[in-house]
Image (tube, rainbow, N blue to C red):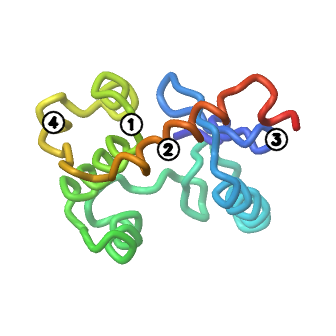
Amino acid sequence: MKFDDLKIDCNTIKINKYTIRLPINLSLQFRHYCILRKKTLDNPSKYLFCNQDGSQWSTSIYSSIADFLSVTILRMDTTGITKYGITNLLKAGISIVGIENLTGAKSDLIRGCMPSGLEDDLEKENRFLNMRLTSSEHYYKL
């Protein structure tokens, strides 16, 4: 991901072709991250996540990203991390096609992550209602 994909003033981040609204707490964390990043980088970097010298974080399983996630989600293998993310996207009601476009994962992997009996009916209705309310024209203007 590129640093320019993060729009702090709009609380959004661009992932592939999608502009995603950031949750409030994550947006605040990114604001702090940008301040720290500016103070500590030796060289400017086009990468959102980079080492102090401005180089891109490693994408291998042996990178610090996997170490952080292993503590957070109790998985360290890349397949487990991917499945964890896909399962949460499915729980949020994102379609298989949407997840394919967002993550690049294949549909058979996504279908293998489909949880059964996740929520009771009231919880589903609450999630749907809140999703629709936040997508109304004036929700964020109030």
- Residue at image mark 2: 127
Q: Earlier in the sequence, mark 2 or mark 1?
A: 1
Q: Earlier in the sequence, mark 3 or mark 2?
A: 3
Residue that appears at 28% across and 53% down: 118
Report whether 53 appears left or right of 106. right
Question: Which percent across, then down, holds residue 71?
Answer: 36, 77
Nearer the observer: mark 4 or 1; the answer is: 1
Q: Amino acid at mark 4?
A: Arg
Q: Earlier in the sequence, mark 3 or mark 1?
A: 3
Residue that appears at 52% across and 40% down: 1
Report whether 15 appears left or right of 141. left
On screen, residue 141 above or below 44: above
Image quadrant in which you'd find residue 20? top right
Q: Amino acid at mark 1?
A: Gly
Nearer the observer: mark 4 or 2; the answer is: 2
- Residue neighbourhood size for the residue with mark 3, other residues' Cα within 10 Å, grouped as few (<14), some (14–19), many (≥20): few
Q: Earlier in the sequence, mark 4 or mark 1?
A: 1
Between residues 55 and 95, which one lies in front from this camera angle?
95
Residue 93: assigned label: 1
Q: Amino acid at mark 2?
A: Arg
Question: Which percent across, then down, holds residue 22?
Answer: 63, 46
Q: Amino acid at mark 3?
A: Asp
Q: Earlier in the sequence, mark 4 or mark 3?
A: 3
Residue 111: assigned label: 4
Query: What whole-number distance in Å separates the C-alpha atoms at marks 4 and 3?
Result: 36 Å
- Residue at image mark 3: 9
Residue 129: assigned label: none
Question: Are the residues at dot 2 and dot 1 in contact (C-beta closer than 8 Å)?
Answer: yes
